[in-house]
Image: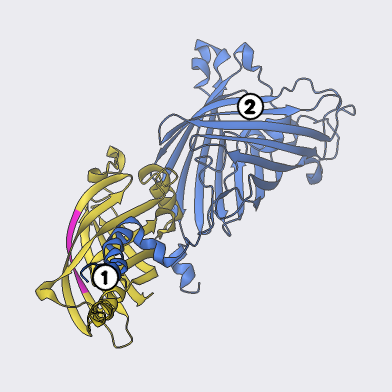
Chain colours: A blue, B yellow
């Protein structure tokens, strides 16, 4: 008589004792499976440039980036040139994020007084959660115009007509890469540079090229970067030009990114550094240089939601 | 009638068992944080906080995806994830604890309740005890609206703030929770 009620009660007792246990273990399980928020890998590089060329990153919508880039003279100039510090090639640039995927930029470099502009579009975004894309792919199209006086053009000859179109060059590039880990990102950049006019008939106007670049974080705010642009052989004589090589350090401090670098490239538009670098890196023809990037949020996400 | 007694007992216990399992939950809780420092005020909001509450036992849990915090400036959001919260390593912040209504109120009873909240807050992989008070409003539609505010110190959760930005990030961050639970 006594054990029958107990046997009847057993399930109820079991439920009562089990309920708090289950609650402790995973209360949130009651909401069902996690709704995965789709996120993409961000901050593969600290800046939209690795050193001279473009990185995987584009500016977010509404962000203006003011860039000051300096390249001192060749270190091989020796003490009489104060190891290059007596001279400087400068580029001032303004970039802006039109959307989270499309950015536009303009700049002016002192090297051959070059004015340049570009469009950069993030076609594929590397997935972090809730999707599967393994890589990021950007497309970059840029154009530059040399605005120096005619007699300083490399192809200057007395009596030759100085057409504006002679001074133009274009570059088309794909930037394909991956943030491999929190600290390491790698990218390859196949592309073509087209120069409307070159100095000799044997030189090619179009030069196929491919770059490779990477960064490795040393701390959360400091990273080592490297970049090399290879111009494919058998595209006509290239003397005196050499491939572009650069090593740098990125230092991020809140709204600024400081990039310090050593490179054999003097100019900072694609024509200048990919196809017309003159320094021999391993013979001391190295520029010490820096880029300073300062970003301003002109148009925050808040303003966007309010219908701007 | 000896066999009627256990049946009666079981019938009496069943509602209690069911009530004990009544769960209230939401996936759209709002967590806002506010940092006030000499050089900069920073606000971020997350509208996807998940939480479950069992009024009868007071058990309460929160889970918040760090990446889902939205900032006014995209760069702040990037730095928040990359440099401070390290959201790739610790994607979520959680809270597990107990909510005890003052004066032994039943939280599901229509009206306004105040309650003590005690539990463990896990941010950036570091657990810290949290004690705060919450206000709850149980509405006629069976929903429970809950709100509370508390302070979190970044250094308590091993979040390092370098010297250059010390005047831009508050030593103590104000966190506000606003959530409406529905019965699950």
The circle drawn on residue A15 is none
Q: Which of the pair A11/B119 is nearer the observer?
A: A11
Residue at the far right: name it.
Answer: A201
Q: In this view, does A231 lie above or below B104?
A: above
Secondary element under disc 1, as helix, strand or loop, is helix
The circle drawn on residue A4 is 1
Is residue B47 visible in the rendered image? The answer is no
Residue beneath the point at 72% across and 42% down: A173
Q: Residues within 10 Å of mark 1 (few under 14, many from 20)?
A: few
Residue beneath the point at 38% across and 63% down: B49
Q: Is residue A206 magenta?
A: no
**Mark in front: 1 vs 2:** 1
Residue at the far bottom: name it.
Answer: B140
Residue beneath the point at 60% across and 55% down: A101
Q: Which of the pair A301/B11 is nearer the observer?
A: B11
Residue A259, given in percent of the width and then of the height, sits at 49, 33
The circle drawn on residue A265 is 2
In the image, the segment drawn in magenta is B130-135
């Amino acid at each position: 008589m006594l054990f029958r009620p107990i046997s009847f009660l057993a399930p109820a007792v079991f439920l009562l004792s089990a309920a708090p246990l289950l609650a402790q273990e995973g209360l949130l399980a009651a909401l069902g499976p996690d709704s995965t928020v789709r996120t993409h890998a961000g901050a593969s590089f600290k800046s939209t440039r690795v050193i001279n060329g473009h990185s995987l990153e584009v500016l977010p919508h509404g962000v203006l980036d003011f860039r000051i880039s300096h390249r001192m003279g060749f270190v091989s100039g020796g003490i009489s040139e104060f190891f290059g510090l007596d001279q400087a090639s400068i580029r001032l640039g303004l970039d802006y994020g039109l959307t989270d995927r499309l950015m536009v930029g303009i700049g002016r470099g002192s090297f051959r007084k070059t004015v340049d502009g570009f469009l950069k579009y993030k076609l594929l975004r590397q997935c972090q959660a809730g999707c599967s894309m393994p890589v990021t792919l950007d497309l970059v199209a840029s154009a530059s115009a040399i605005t120096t006086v005619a007699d300083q053009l490399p192809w200057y000859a007395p009596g030759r007509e100085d057409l504006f179109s002679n001074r133009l060059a274009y570059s088309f590039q794909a930037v394909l890469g991956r943030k491999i880990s929190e600290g390491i990102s790698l990218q390859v950049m196949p592309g073509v540079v087209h120069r409307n006019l070159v100095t000799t008939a044997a030189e090619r106007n179009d030069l196929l090229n491919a770059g490779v670049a990477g960064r490795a974080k040393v701390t959360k705010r400091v990273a080592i970067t490297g970049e090399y642009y290879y111009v494919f052989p058998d595209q006509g004589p290239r003397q005196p030009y050499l491939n572009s090589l650069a090593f740098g350090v990125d230092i991020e401090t809140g709204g600024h990114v400081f990039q310090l670098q050593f490179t054999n490239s003097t100019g900072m538009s694609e024509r200048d550094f990919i196809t017309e670098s003159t320094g021999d890196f391993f013979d001391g023809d190295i520029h010490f240089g820096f880029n300073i990037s300062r970003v301003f949020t002109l148009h925050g996400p808040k303003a966007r939601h309010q219908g701007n | 009638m000896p066999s009627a007694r256990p049946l009666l007992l079981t019938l009496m216990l069943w509602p209690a068992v069911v009530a004990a399992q009544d769960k209230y939950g939401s996936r759209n809780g709002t967590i806002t944080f506010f940092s006030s420092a000499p050089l900069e005020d920073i606000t971020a909001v997350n509208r996807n906080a998940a939480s479950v509450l069992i009024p009868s036992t007071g058990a309460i849990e929160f889970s918040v995806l760090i990446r889902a915090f939205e900032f006014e400036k995209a760069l702040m959001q990037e730095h928040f994830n990359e440099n401070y919260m390290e959201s790739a390593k610790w994607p979520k912040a959680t809270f597990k604890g107990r909510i005890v209504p003052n004066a032994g109120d039943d939280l599901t009873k229509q009206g306004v309740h105040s309650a003590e909240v005690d539990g463990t807050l896990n941010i950036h992989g570091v657990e810290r005890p949290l004690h705060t008070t919450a206000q709850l409003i149980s509405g006629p539609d069976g929903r429970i609206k809950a709100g509370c505010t508390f302070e979190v110190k970044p250094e308590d959760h091993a979040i390092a703030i370098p010297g250059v930005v010390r005047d831009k990030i508050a030593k103590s961050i104000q966190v506000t929770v606003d959530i409406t639970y529905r019965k699950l």
